[in-house]
Image (cartoon, coloured by chain):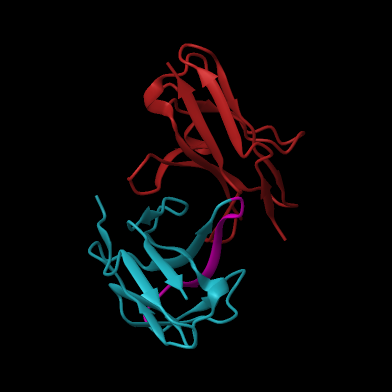
Chain colours: A red, B cyan
């Protein structure tokens, strides 16, 4: 069975500092990986997916199959990045997502 | 954008009551999901449906059932609510672009 682990429940950084939200997964096949974000009082929404290889709101994430990781990074954090972030995995053959426990990011002024 | 609407934002029920959580989506998406969201546990899949009248168990289906009589509507049913079902419940819909889920605002259920 697949599993997604986000080791940090809380992460606090100062504005302008780099930020990295960690995500590790276990799955024997070739998964697709996603990051979802939930801002305060807003719906959970897709931030980015690894196959797109794009930067969204300054965030990037690289799939490292050797380390089975999909860490989310941003070189200069902004206060508006404060939110709950979830890493998610989808099996190659299916449509259901398995989510991690989430990381609450706080960017301090 | 897909609009997913959950009819009840906040509910308070008593132990043993039957609870219905309704979810409607407006973009003709095939796949619909029910998750519960708990601090420290993330999102856990309860049930999902890939077509009308079709359903599959997720990771934590015990104590829950679902109904999908129409494509746009996916209901979560708690036959006999218990205090450990106090949680935030999130409905989501997804189309052919697998992995892109559109979520509702959530239904916060408190069972006393």
Residue A57: in sight, yes or no?
no
Specify the principal SS of the magenta part. Answer: strand
Q: Classify B20 as above or below B108.
A: below
Tell which of A48 and A51 is nearer to you.
Answer: A48
Q: Classify A6 as above or below B90.
A: above
Q: Give the range drawn in magenta.
A: B40-52
Q: Position of residue A68 (x, y in %)?
A: 72, 38
Residue at the far top: name it: A16
Q: Position of residue B71 (x, y in %)?
A: 30, 75
Tag count: 0
Q: Classify A29 as above or below A23.
A: below
Q: Where is residue B46 in the image (x, y as percent from the top left)?
A: 53, 70
Name the residue located 71 percent from the left edge and 36 percent from the top edge.
Answer: A65
Residue B69: in sight, yes or no?
yes
Q: In the rendered structure, does residue B34 fall within the stretch colored magenta? A: no
Specify whether B5 is left or right of A45: left
Name the residue located 71 percent from the left edge and 52 percent from the top edge.
Answer: A29
Name the residue located 44 percent from the left edge and 25 percent from the top edge.
Answer: A55
Residue at the far front: name it: B112
Write down the quadrant of residue A42 in the picture: top left
Q: In the rendered structure, does residue B51 fall within the stretch colored magenta? A: yes
Q: Where is residue B85 in the image (x, y as percent from the top left)?
A: 53, 72
């Amino acid at each position: 069975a697949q599993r997604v682990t986000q080791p940090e429940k809380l992460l606090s950084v100062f504005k302008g500092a780099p930020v990295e939200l960690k995500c590790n997964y276990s799955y024997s096949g070739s998964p697709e990986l996603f990051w979802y974000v939930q801002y305060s009082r807003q719906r959970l929404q897709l931030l980015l997916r690894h196959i797109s290889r794009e930067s969204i709101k300054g965030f990037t994430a690289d799939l490292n199959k050797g380390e089975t990781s999909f860490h989310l990074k941003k070189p200069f954090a902004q206060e508006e990045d404060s939110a709950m972030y979830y890493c998610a995995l989808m099996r190659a053959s299916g449509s259901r997502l398995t989510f991690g426990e989430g990381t609450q990011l706080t960017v301090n002024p | 954008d897909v609009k997913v609407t959950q009819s009840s934002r906040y509910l308070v029920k008593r132990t043993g009551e039957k609870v219905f959580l309704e979810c409607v989506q407006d973009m003709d998406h095939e796949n619909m999901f029910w998750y519960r969201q708990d601090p420290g546990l993330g999102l856990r899949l309860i049930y999902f449906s890939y077509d009308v009248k079709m359903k599959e168990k997720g990771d934590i289906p015990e104590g829950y059932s679902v109904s999908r009589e129409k494509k746009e509507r996916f209901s979560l049913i708690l036959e006999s609510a218990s205090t450990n079902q106090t949680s935030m419940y999130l409905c989501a819909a997804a189309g052919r672009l697998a992995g892109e889920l559109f979520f509702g605002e959530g239904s916060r259920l408190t069972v006393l």
